[in-house]
Image: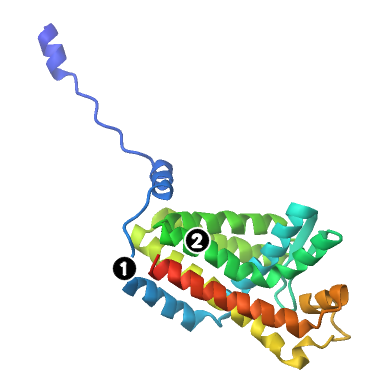
Amino acid sequence: MLLSVIALTPSPSPTTPGRIEQITEQIANRQSPTPNWLVLFTGLLALLFVGTSIIRRVATSSHEGAHATAAGMMGQVSGITLPLKGSAFTTVQVTGFASFLTLFIGYLGPPLFGLLGAWLLSRDHPVAVLWLAIVLFGVVLWLIKNPFGAFFAAAIGGVLLLVAWNTTLAVQTVVAYFLVWSLLLRGSRHVSPYLAAAARKMDPKAKEKSDYRALREMTYVPQIIYVVVHLALCWSALAFGAWLMLVA
């Protein structure tokens, strides 16, 4: 009888890891290297969509996120406003040199976040790029003070979460590269309109002055100097990011 009981007792089956454990492992572990043709394809795809409203608003979110990050390190952040129409702005409490850095870093937000993603991709961590973007949009959502901005941050973060949670590694890799390329490409597109003198003039009806106008009033350095410096840094970030993703 004892032998029969032992024989009929099912042996325990090995447990399969849950989805959270799988994602954690994918974030920590390096994935297979991405072929250069796919990196170039996602870059061309990003180039086609870099002028769309969604990509512009993603870049604006990273711009305001850079303001908030700098201000949070050196002062206080009251909130971010990302309106449907008009200029986005971040309300902060900073003084002195911290105020200058907070203003200066804004237009470098897209290329800097893009460079961070490019570095992770060069180390074969596309899943980590997606989850980092999700976390950052979560922080932006927490700081947003207007309904449209909250809706946009939640929508983009939700789409990225859906991709990271439900799609294959191949799809996640394509989305990660597309996002990084979009930020790197959008950097100079975000700044170049201010090369025109008309764009740098103060609109008397505007409620908020541009970053370049504020920098001019703070330092007495002509706005065009900051525009040229930002453009040079944005193009350098694009070149370095492309090198990281294709060569490094």
Quadrant for the N terminus in the image: top left
| Residue closer to the observer: 148 or 160 | 160
Which residue is pictured at 53% across the width and 80% down the height? 50
Tell me which amino acid carries mark 2: Leu
| Residue closer to the observer: 27 or 73 | 73
Residue 126: image quadrant is bottom left
| Residue closer to the observer: 156 or 174 | 174
Label 2 to label 1: alpha-carbon separation: 23 Å
Please indicate whether residue 19 sits to the left or right of residue 193 in the image.
left
| Residue closer to the observer: 157 or 94 | 94
> In the rendering, at what x and y percent does residue 41 appear?
37, 76
Which residue is pictured at 52% across the width and 75% down the height? 238
Marks 2 and 1, the one that precedes in the sequence: 1
> In the rendering, at what x and y percent does residue 82 appear?
71, 69
**Circle 2 crowding by C-alpha within 10 Å: few under 14, some 14–19, many from 20:** some
- Residue that label 2 marks: 160
- Residue that label 1 marks: 35
Please indicate whether residue 151 sits to the left or right of residue 242 in the image.
right
With respect to residue 10, does 41 lie above or below? below
Tell me which amino acid carries mark 1: Pro
> In the rendering, at what x and y percent does residue 200 appear?
78, 86
Which residue is pictured at 53% across the width and 61% down the height? 116
